[in-house]
Amino acid sequence: MGYLRERVSYLRGLAEGMQISDATNEGKLLKAIIDVMDDIALAVEDVEEVQEQMGEQIETLDEDLAEVESVLFDDDYDEYDNEGCYATNVECPYCEEPMDISEDMINDENMVECPNCHKEFEIEWDCECGSKDDEIQEQ
């Protein structure tokens, strides 16, 4: 039993102990007020119970969401940790057209094919995977 219901029960017992009669208008009004207060106390208890259930559901959803974020984002961050080493913009030494290159565009011999003139040129990766000053050098 909640605190509000205890207080309403106390008031109901107090009214009965004072022998407030239903025969008088004041007695009818007082008992009606106590009944309304009891209804309000029950409604508040119901709201508190629903709120507690919703809080538990939110906690569960938060935990599930944290797990999903961990699965989705942790792998992605690892994938792009060294992106600066393997993705950049270079100029083709033959046609002088700028092009964006990434690691998957480079073959085993560190050669890149220009998408404009289709000539291959060598890329030297001077990278220690952590230095912001590492750049792609053309040869």
Image: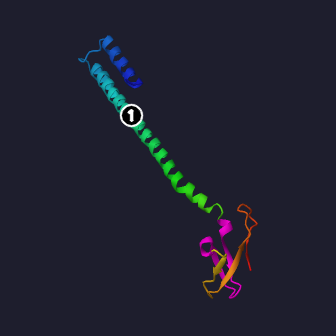
Report whether 16 appears left or right of 136.
left
Report whether 55 appears left or right of 112.
left
What residue is pinned by disc 1?
Answer: 49
Q: 49 or 100: nearer the eye?
A: 100
* Highlighted range, magenta: 83-107
Picture coordinates of residue 4 (x, y %)?
40, 25
Locate the N terminus and report the quarter of the image it occupies.
top left
The residue at the far left in this view is: 23
Locate the C terminus and report the quarter of the image it occupies.
bottom right
Q: Residue at x 36, y 22 (%)?
A: 8
Q: Residues within 10 Å of mark 1 (few under 14, many from 20)?
A: few
Q: Residue at x 61, y 62 (%)?
A: 80
Tell me where residue 76 sits by quadrant. bottom right
Report whether 19 appears left or right of 127.
left
Type of colouring: rainbow
Q: Is residue 108 magenta?
A: no
Q: 10 or 63: nearer the eye?
A: 63
